[in-house]
């Protein structure tokens, strides 16, 4: 048991080090900014039953890479029907912009990236913004 625990701790540290070194400084900066802005966003309201089913199916996905791909796809779908509103805060608009630019990078990282808390936070950010976009008054 102790050997397995030591293995998991060492593996986690190696993954974090590898991921940190494999990302460009711009990507690391974008990830930090997305996580920071996501913590400031509050989404009010309840999505429709269909939207709720979509969100829950992404959340329940056990494979982290598939979860990221699904979250990005849902974001793209929600963004397609969205028109910016004057009610949107500068934080949400900046977060939308960052996530738009990060879409390709979010799904093309090394497999070990998706095991990190940062990747899970990015996927959660995509879902949070998707929910905001789906609940927006200007969404189709």
Image (cartoon, rainbow, N blue to C red):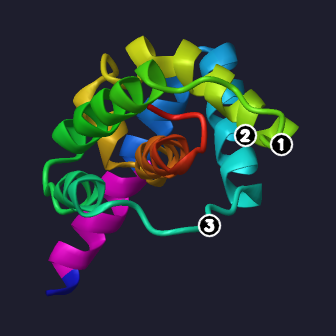
| Magenta-tinted stretch | 3-13
Q: Is 50 on the left-hand or right-hand side of 46?
A: left
> Residue 104: within the magenta?
no
- SS category of the residue bearing label 2: helix
10 Å crowding of disc 1: few (<14), some (14-19), many (20+): few
Q: Could you say which quadrant of the image residue 123 lies in?
A: top left
Residue 15 position, x and y percent, is 37, 43
Residue 44: numbered disc: 3
**What residue is drawn where x is 30% and y is 38%?**
68
| Quadrant, the C terminus | top left
Residue nearer the viewer, 104 or 42? 42
Say whether marks 1 and 2 touch (CB < 8 Å).
Answer: yes
The residue tagged 2 is 92
Q: Is 131 on the left-hand or right-hand side of 69?
A: right
**What residue is drawn where x is 14% and y is 87%?**
1
Residue 87 position, x and y percent, is 81, 43
Residue 23 appears in view: no
The residue tagged 1 is 89
Q: CA distance from mark 3 to mark 2?
A: 13 Å
Q: CA distance from mark 3 to mark 1?
A: 13 Å
Residue nearer the viewer, 98 or 10? 98
Q: Is residue 99 above or below residue 124?
A: above
- The total number of labels drawn is 3
Residue 87 appears in view: yes
**What residue is drawn where x is 29% and y is 53%?**
51
């Amino acid at each position: 048991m102790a050997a397995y625990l030591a293995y998991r701790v060492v593996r986690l540290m190696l993954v974090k080090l590898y991921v940190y070194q494999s990302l460009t400084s711009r990507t690391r900066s974008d990830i930090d900014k997305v996580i920071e802005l996501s913590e400031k966003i509050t989404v009010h309201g309840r999505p429709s039953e269909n939207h709720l089913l979509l969100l829950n199916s992404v959340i329940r996905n056990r494979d982290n890479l598939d979860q990221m791909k699904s979250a990005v796809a849902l974001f793209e779908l929600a963004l397609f029907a969205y028109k910016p509103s004057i009610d949107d805060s500068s934080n949400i608009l900046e977060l939308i912009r960052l996530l738009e630019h990060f879409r390709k990078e979010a799904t093309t990282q090394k497999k070990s990236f998706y095991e990190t808390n940062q990747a899970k936070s990015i996927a959660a950010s995509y879902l949070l913004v998707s929910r905001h976009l789906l609940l927006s008054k200007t969404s189709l």
